[in-house]
Amino acid sequence: MTDLRDSKLVGADIRRKLNHPVVDSDGHMNEALFAVLDFVKQVGGAKIAARYEDMMNNDTTGSSRRAVWVGNSGPASIDRATSMLPRLYRSRLEEAGMDFGIIYGTHALSVLGLNDDEMRPVVYRAMNMLYADMFKDVQDRLTPVALIPMHSPEEAVAELDFAIGELGLKAIVMNAMVSRPAPEVVAEAPHLAKYTMAPTSPAIDVGDSFDPVWAKCVELGVAPSCHNSFRGRGSTHGSPSNYVFNSLGSFGQGGEYFCRALFFGGVPHRFPSLKFSFLEGGAGWGSQLYNTMFEYWGKRNLESLKEYLDPAKLDVDLLVEMFEKWGNDYLTPERIRKAPHQSVNSNLFVPPEEVNDFLPTGVTKPEDIRDIFARNFYFGSEADDRMTAVAFDEKLNHYGLKLNAILGSDIGHWDVPDMTKVMVEAYEMVDDGYITEEDFKAFTFGNVVDMHTGMNPDFFKGTAVESEVAKHMAQSGAMAAE
């Protein structure tokens, strides 16, 4: 791996090698909190703005108390300023070797977890108004991402209509891991409810109650993105003292949780045109989930359940015969005949149809799994993540599928101390032979274009990459027609 601190290359040098634009699917802004409060006050009034300011100042969660240090010192200071000022960000894209950026909030990631029912709608709306205003002069190169609350379908649909329909924003991120307290504690000891928060998903175990949200996304032409990390109290990433311990793998777990929920909740089956992105966790988990899915399907599809796993079909006589031949003074044929279903997981006598976990997915053959991952799922991967290469490994992935990995720079956060080195780091996968130039084009341009234009053909209209996107769409259409 190149020591980028010693490298004289910058992103612009990499960009000159390429015959295609670079679209960053996940850059970051750092919102000025005084500006956030300006818009919260505008939407909800001075009282709620003061309450929100107090909430931010008194946040005592472990992750917020540990320093994240986003470009606070030395040469990184210019990157901190860049992430706060969209016009400066736009002016530095060429040096970074990028042509267009889709920009997520940073304070937004804490807003996604806001549970206060009075404050949440106000803050979400204020954030979206702030983003629309901040980026209004740089739309040819940058587009901000709207925040969509997912505590209820009605709340989500209302904010989709406002952010996309009224403000004209084009991309969204939603809270795909809504924390809810144990209902028993809420009923018996509501003052303790906050200590029992556990993640729930709007994509599974909710029936079709969130279908109006997915339908609204299709109607408005937006691809839901997930930017959740699984960390904090009650998670496997809950250290109160070690930020790196909590951060490692947490976005991968958050994305994998949402992806599994979507798949087994049947959302891609009911909304086949809807595309989802899972950001900042890489593509390694996506490849593992994709390939493991076939192993589960092979053992737990309905026909296999009927043939091999139905407790009602246990051959008790054979079991008795084997105990008689191979047992001992306590593993006796008499005892096993009296209670043949010893294992607790063999005692559930229900028809296999009632435990067919694949039923909501619409999957009837293994190729259907391939098609859902190819059509609906996109995996945001950072430049320094060499596991991105597994997304493009045709030998490894079932059916030779190349997963839809998309470059997410994470510019604006601590792991990008110099935004001009992102493309240098990303291109190392080509230099080191992990992926091809064609794969790199898909990673930095084709896949993210397919995702957004697949929802909204005009997503890149009026941008600096409009003509190249049009050529790509025409070529893709011609290939699909063959």
Image: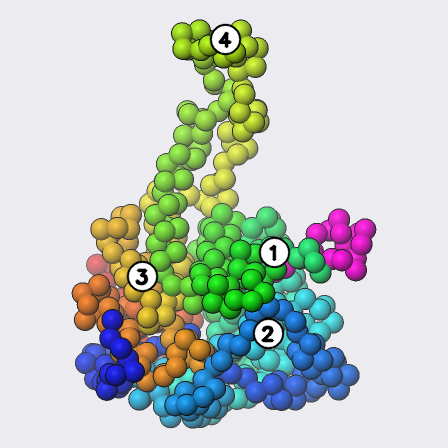
Check disc 2 and report its element: helix, strand or loop: helix
Magenta span main SS: helix
70 sits left or right of 45 in the view: left
Q: Which residue is mark 1?
A: 234
Q: Which residue is mark 4?
A: 329
Q: Amino acid at mark 2?
A: Arg
**Seen from this angle, which residue lies furthest right?**
188
Crowding at dot 4, Cα within 10 Å, few <14 / some 14-19 / many 20+, comes out as few
Q: Mark 3 to mark 1: distance in Å?
A: 28 Å
Q: Mark 4 to mark 2: distance in Å?
A: 61 Å
79 sits left or right of 429 in the view: right
Q: Amino acid at mark 1?
A: Gly
Q: Which residue is mark 3?
A: 387
Q: How many marks?
A: 4
Give percent across and percent down for residue 137. 47, 92
Mark 1 vs mark 2: which is more N-terminal?
A: 2
